[in-house]
Image: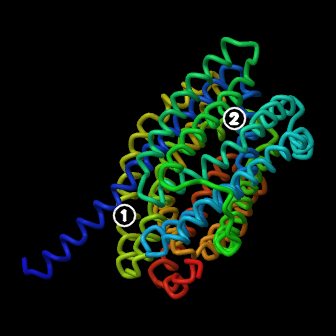
Amino acid sequence: MNVPDRKNENRLKLIIAESWSVGWPMTLIMFFEFLIGLTDVYVAGRFGKEVQAAYGIAFQLYFIFIIIGLAFSVGSVSVISRLFTSDKKEEFRHSVNSSFLASGLLGLFFTILGIIFAKKIINVLGMPNMLKGYASAFLIIYSAGFFFDYILLNTNGTLRACKLIKKSLWTMAIVCVLNVALDFALAFHTPLGFRGIAVATVVSLFVGAALNINYVRKIIRLSFEFSLPIIKKILSISWPSGVLQIVWQLGVMAIFLILNAFKHNNVEIMAAFTNGLRIESAIFLPAFAFNMANAVLVGNFLGKNKKEEAVHMGAATAGLGVFIIIILTLIVLFSAKTAAFLLSNNPVVIEECIKYLYISLMFEPFMAWGIILGGGLNGAGDTKSVMLIVCGTLWLIRIPLAFIFGISLGFGAIGVWWAMNVSIFVQAVLMSVRFFTKKWLVNSERVIPQ
């Protein structure tokens, strides 16, 4: 092996090592999220299929309410990670304080909005009457936690961008343990009943937000300092991610509505879809962990004006993530039946859940590849391209095919699951084309506020 080959090999090792240094804590954080979600579904299932199906719908609505916070954190991480590795220390301080204050105000707004309009939103969806009361109760309580969730999302992003992800890891570990413990304690041992699932979430979010505020305060003095140019820059990066998240959650709701239109076993199939998503999140969430890790790593390299290294880092992180996802997919594949039995005692729900898992698991590597490359593009501020690719494949491929295969052609739930796989494959192809043509590098220097 000649000297240039050794240099390239060492360079690749360094890139993979740096990718792993951010990827593994994010994977654990997402694993904690997975445990929380799995526990929620399990506890909901002990109260019956109606509560389990209502929880699935309410949780999708919950995500619609925190979409702005998720999107805003994408823009914040892109800007803060770039400023953190640059020599613009004053702008860095302004960006942390401004994003924190804006996130808190947004969270407070959506808390008030959610509490007031929760019941009306549930009624508008036209779901079965047997689910409305359960779903309304879930959403009203969840709304009380939006403020804490917005703060937690923002501070987790700040810690991640500043290479302090292990602080975020500790916070989320505590949130996970507390949430899981309270799920069982409040739901089974207090008059709250099934409502204890949502109350457990709100309490754990409050504790997580308080811990993270303390960590961020040690990095930089938090204040009411507000920089309009920085907020404008964050919003210019964030809004496509916000649109993407809204369209995506509406797409998930559209899938639920298509399933609800089935003439037979519609409630059981919706419950099975809810359970399947939770089990699949053992794979899906780690993919998003590497998505967020890639955003930070690409942003850090671009902050140092190392564009080619940013490209190599993005590709290496995606490759590493896919390798891990393949291993996780095999684990979930062999434990699918056991997991389905654990989450429900209804034979139809169990059977439909297993079918969903076997079909969806085939395309998990493609899902991971597209999602992780999209994280690199987000870190570069190329959020518009990610939005167009994901929204296009969702509404031009997934939803139409789900309706055609599932209802028009009469294939039922299996047709819906295959429609989802087709859209995942197309999305991965389009994301690869965008990333490796490197067009996103042209405007990457505009991310840092001047």
Above or below residue 212? Residue 236 is: below
Task: Say the numbered circle drawn on residue 442.
Answer: none
- As helix, strand or loop, the secondary structure at mark 1 comes to helix
Q: Residue at 75% of width from left, 27% of height from top?
A: 51
In this view of the protein, which residue sits in the foreground, 182 or 305? 305
Percent across and percent down for residue 244 are: 68, 64
Q: Residue furthest left?
A: 1
Which residue is depicted at the point 28% across and 60% down? 17
Q: Which residue is mark 2?
A: 271
Looking at the image, which is closer to me, 139 or 131? 139
**Place of residue 237 in the rendered image (x, y in percent of width and height, measured from the top left):** 64, 72
Residue 19 in percent (x, y) is at 35, 61
Name the colour scheme.
rainbow
Q: Is residue 36 left or right of residue 362?
A: right
Which of the two discs, 1 and 2, sits closer to the camera? 1
Is the C terminus in the top left, top right, bottom left or bottom right quadrant? bottom right
Mark 2: amino acid? Ala
Inter-mark Cα distance, 1 to 2: 34 Å
Task: Please state, as top left, top right, bottom left or bottom right, where the N terminus lies in the image.
Answer: bottom left
The mark that comes first in sequence, 1 or 2, is 2
Left or right placement of residue 120 versus residue 431 in this view = right
The three-letter amino acid code for the residue at tag 1 is Gly
Is 304 drawn above or below residue 294 in the view shown?
below
Kindly identify which numbered label has been placed on residue 319: 1
Neighbourhood count class around disc 2 (C-alpha, 10 Å): few under 14, some 14–19, many 20 upward: many
Q: Residues within 10 Å of mark 1 (few under 14, many from 20)?
A: some
Residue drawn at (37%, 80%) of the image = 306
